[in-house]
Image (spheres, coloured by chain):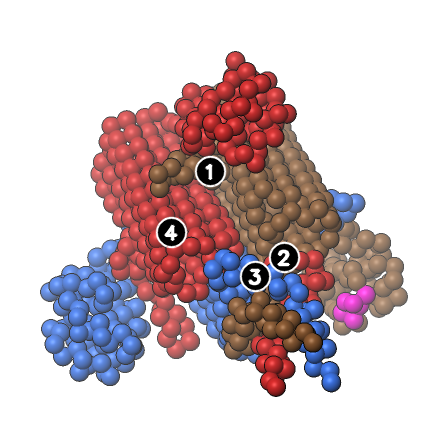
Chain colours: A blue, B brown, C red
């Protein structure tokens, strides 16, 4: 009898766990899991465990298993139908089987596809559109005229379609450039909690199919993010950057504006991308952590680095 | 016939576009725009384009044009009057022509100036004040006793007046220092989505006239930001920092607490300000991005930099 | 007569101020404060001030004083009882003296302890639990099945229990790993505005007693934060990191995933923790700020640092 999914380290009787790589193989010998998912190469080492599922791509299998498990045992609690406290404009067009949670607001001429599910406190602006089967967790804001595709998941606090940051300097003050574009989000996109995606200044900000954005990510105006690119928490992408498909951006990284990143570029966490990258690969730029005293010495010396180079040059002269 | 504003690169028949600098001049020869805004120096190169607007400050002209365009073709959808679902305290004082969106909350003794417009789900605390013509997009939170000036724009998810982060250590735990100050925001300020401005500990946190803050910016307690300073997305300013007027802070930069930045200081994106800056100018501090293998070598060597300096010194000795 | 608490620098007649360290002693000679709190070592220097409170731990005393002051003069404005506009599930269990603000939502089977106070627009998911005397400021989201302990304070916009960021790569796309764990938050925890704490993938994300998190902090799935650890604004902690007790993490710092930090580890602001730290102490890693021209030179040279080391080596050869 399996009654939960567990990490292999904390698995107990009743747990189904997984081991995807040989380097975690020793966990198999000590686990209390009742069943495990392993690749063929580890099947022998799992012989002593009562239940064994042997598959080639363990992690992928496990992902589907979590989806199955959630459907069965932890379905999202949704309002069924339209909660009476929601404020839905009469001109909004709702598909079949739409759920709208308590105190949600749906604006004029908004369009919600079939099976769309809005959590409590969602705000959907006028003329905004949401594709079929997309789910908004509580307190998502989708602003006027922006569109989200099908089967997307948007987490609480996300703001889609706020104004981009555009001002013309004039006599020491800033004159607002109204942001006239929208945000266009593809299918199968997931957007994290409190993440912001700004509308374009003139054209649209575009998020491709299958993109995954973690929490507290900032996407500036006019940015294009290619399909199946993933960004971890706290990433900032400045305006008009064009990011390829199948890229990954590590947590806390910053991509400056007006840059182009090729497909399959991978940025390490907390790195700052200051130039376009036309070749796939892994890129990094982080000051190494050290004990404070060592860091202070090295950081101080770093400010003389160029001068040190000149001194080396001089030493090299015959 | 002009039916849209477009970037020069994607302009088509019906587009009005602009070219502000000579370095983009070659776009003029290939654009399909029906009309362009150019400076006098580029007027000749725009001869072949049907419509030409020649002005000295193209970008400033364009900014005003976007405002005109928005008023005409994409006005903000606002509740007219007070939506019946809003919860407005009887003691709140509302000016003329105030709009309050669905499910907004206005607390006791709050004061809203003429033409204030609150989007859906706004929360205005008790004794908070909002100046005339200020607009809150949906889901802005202005907490008790805080004030926002006239003609401000606050974007969705912004939180103005949460407690500053203040605790006294005592026997291994943290004792809360109640935050008794407020936030005072000047006129013509724009505040981005999900940005946070904390209330002061004793005195107030103060944001000067004309300041522009992008999304996901953090302003700590007691901070003072001078007039017309602009900060891009994901900037963090720690408590009690004093930032001058007409400064710019690039995206993802961090300003440590209790520092003073002079007027006209400009901080590059992702840089960390660890000391006060008394001279205007551009300041930077970012580890340069590199391919991962090169970065690893240089980062490892960086931890020996101070020792390398000593070795150079030794080599220099006769 | 004391009518306000003030910083020593801006104290006026009627102010009660404090000076905790000898290095601020000179403020005593010029202050207009009517009364001061000082340590015994500074009592003599405060002789001329009408009111003097002499205590060993000035800052701790002051913290309690702010709490006293707030209770008396600036109590939080709370709905008393359940506001009629709130949507509270009939199956929710509410303790004694619970306050629920306007337009809050409390889900099925949620449990609110005695004296819990929810601000306007709070969303409490189904089966979520909140301990006695905990206060949610307006617009906090606590998602299904997550728990918050007693005497906690959660600020506006915080999202507790959004999905962790977990996907299995498969044929160029990302397959969602449903996040089946919860968030478990201890007692006396404070959580800042727009901060996000993700639910665990299988096990729970756990925040220990007495932890203090500032605004816009990101806590990934499965993270464990030990008791009385404090993190300043904009910190990001990636998934499955284990952070000890009594740690501090400076603003904007990033802790990578699957790392372990010992108790009493202190991370400087904006530093990036890329490896586990088993020894207490202060750790740093920040590129030093410089004027832009100097930075450019040093940053360019940094990309040749490893090569420079080799040149030094060569020079050292006899």
Quarter of the figure with residue A306: bottom right
Residues at marks 2 and 1, CA–CA distance in whole angstroms: 27 Å
Q: Mark 4 — on which chain does it sit?
A: C
Coordinates of residue A221 in the picture (x, y in percent): 60, 57
Disc 1 with disc 3 on a shared chain: no
Residue C257 visible in image: no
Determine which residue is flagged by label 3: A297
Q: Tell me if A190 is positioned left or right of B22 in this view.
A: left
- Please give the label number shown on residue B166: 1
Residues at marks 4 and 1, CA–CA distance in whole angstroms: 19 Å
Numbered disc 1: secondary structure: loop
Disc 3 with disc 4 on a shared chain: no
Residues at marks 4 and 2, CA–CA distance in whole angstroms: 28 Å
Disc 2 with disc 1 on a shared chain: no
Magenta residues (range): B22-27
Coordinates of residue B11 in the picture (x, y in percent): 70, 65
- Please give the label number shown on residue C264: 4
Q: Is residue B119 above or below residue C46?
A: below
Numbered disc 3: secondary structure: helix
Residues at marks 1 and 3, CA–CA distance in whole angstroms: 31 Å
* The C terminus of chain B lies in quadrant: bottom right
């Amino acid at each position: 009898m399996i009654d939960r999914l567990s990490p292999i380290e904390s698995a107990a009787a009743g747990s189904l766990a997984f081991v995807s790589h040989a380097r975690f193989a020793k966990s198999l010998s000590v686990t209390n899991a009742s069943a495990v998912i392993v690749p063929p190469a580890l099947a022998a080492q799992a012989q002593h465990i009562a239940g064994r599922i042997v598959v080639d791509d363990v992690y992928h299998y496990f992902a589907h298993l979590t989806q199955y498990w959630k459907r069965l045992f932890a379905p999202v609690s949704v309002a069924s139908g339209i909660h009476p406290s929601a404020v839905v404009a009469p001109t909004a067009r709702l598909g079949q089987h739409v759920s709208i949670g308590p105190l949600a607001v749906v604006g004029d001429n908004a369009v919600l596809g079939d099976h769309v599910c809005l959590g409590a406190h969602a705000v959907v602006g006028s003329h905004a559109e949401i594709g079929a089967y997309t789910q908004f967790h509580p307190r998502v804001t989708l602003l006027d005229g922006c569109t989200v595709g099908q089967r997307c998941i948007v987490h609480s606090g996300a703001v889609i379609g706020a104004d981009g940051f555009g001002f013309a300097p004039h006599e020491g003050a800033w004159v607002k450039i109204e942001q006239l574009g929208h945000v266009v989000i593809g299918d199968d996109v997931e957007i994290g909690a409190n993440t912001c995606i700004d509308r374009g200044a003139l054209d649209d900000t575009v998020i491709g199919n299958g993109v995954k954005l973690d929490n507290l990510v900032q996407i500036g105006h006019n940015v294009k993010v290619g399909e199946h690119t993933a960004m971890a928490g706290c990433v900032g992408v400045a305006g008009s950057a064009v990011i390829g498909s199948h890229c990954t951006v590590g947590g806390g990284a910053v991509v400056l504006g007006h840059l182009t990143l090729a497909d399959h570029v991978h940025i390490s966490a907390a790195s700052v991308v200051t130039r376009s990258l036309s070749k796939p690969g892994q890129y990094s730029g982080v000051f190494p952590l050290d004990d404070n005293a060592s860091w202070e010495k090295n950081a101080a010396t770093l400010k003389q680095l160029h001068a040190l180079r000149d001194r080396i040059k001089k030493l090299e002269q015959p």
